[in-house]
Amino acid sequence: MTMSPAPQSPNELSGDRLDRFARHIVLPEIGGAGQVALAQAHVLVAGLGGIGAPALQFLAAAGIGKLTLVDNDVVDLTNLQRQTIYTERDIGHGKAVAARQWVANFDRALDVTISDTRITAETAPGMIEGVSLVLDGTDNFATRLAMADACVAERVPLLSAAVGRFQGQVGAFAGHLANQPCYRCYVGDAFDAEDCDTCAADGMLGAMSGWTASFAALQAVRVIVSASGGPFADGWGDPQWGQIHILDGLKPGMRTLRIAKDPACRACGHGG
Ligand SMILES: [Zn+2]
């Protein structure tokens, strides 16, 4: 007689998954319930560059069950200094395809969808349907604002992260909620048409990508687990909506800005 495996409810983790995430589960702030919330979460990573590529390592390692990876670029030799999932063999290949291969090698249990569709005001809403959280690491304001506006309209939380030179920024937004600002409340309307990708001209310390991206992954776990209930240690249960953390690699140190909701915002206020 063979032993049949115990039936798995969607609210339980199987034996090898319990082992894989044991260091999470032992934390009272995560626990079994938090790890199940991570397994049931669907995170869309917009941009698989200096933010998205290193962040993906910790999102996948955290057992985020479903990942949608969006980028229309190909891997370039100059990316390897900070976009740590790619190797020399990936040069010339699509970033989304290479990222999916990285996840497949890392954890076959994760459900990965990829897209090389450009993120625009027209395409973003369809992309994020049913998503629990968007992590936006794209490199220009027009794309960021298109994604941010779609997140407000579709009621999807947004983590917006950026890095350049020795500075990183990570902010959490839930502009669909009353009294919570959106990303457009923060940057305003001036940048819709402007491409502000200055990475090539300004340079970037590679490890700043890692610090900023892994901090963004920490905040992603915070947002997902905080929605699942307690118990929480001081500060952990707060998704930190409307707070932007500025990471300074020169000092080094971190400071936090609080963004107010703009009542006239055309995405989340009455200016639409
Ligand atoms: Zn707004």
Image (cartoon, rainbow, N blue to C red):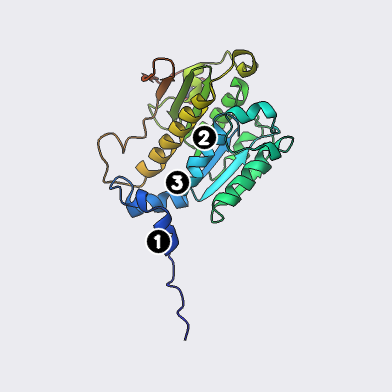
- Label 1 belongs to which residue? 12
Q: Classify mark 3: residues with Cα within 10 Å, few (<14), some (14-19) or many (20+).
A: some
- CA gap between label 3 and label 2 equals 15 Å
Q: Earlier in the sequence, mark 1 or mark 3?
A: 1
Name the mark nearer the viewer: 1 or 3. Answer: 3
94 with respect to 255 (left or right): right
91 with respect to 202 (left or right): right
Q: Which sits in the foreground, 76 or 45? A: 76
State the image coordinates of residue 184 (x, y, percent, origin top left). 51, 21
Please say if 259 is above or below 64: above
Label number found at residue 135: 2
- Label 3 belongs to which residue? 62
Residue at 45% across, 26% down: 170
Residue at 47% across, 31% down: 159
State how many labels appear.
Answer: 3
204 with respect to 246 (left or right): right
State the image coordinates of residue 129 (x, y, percent, origin top left). 57, 43
| Kind of residue at disc 2 | Leu
Please say if 171 is above or below 237: above
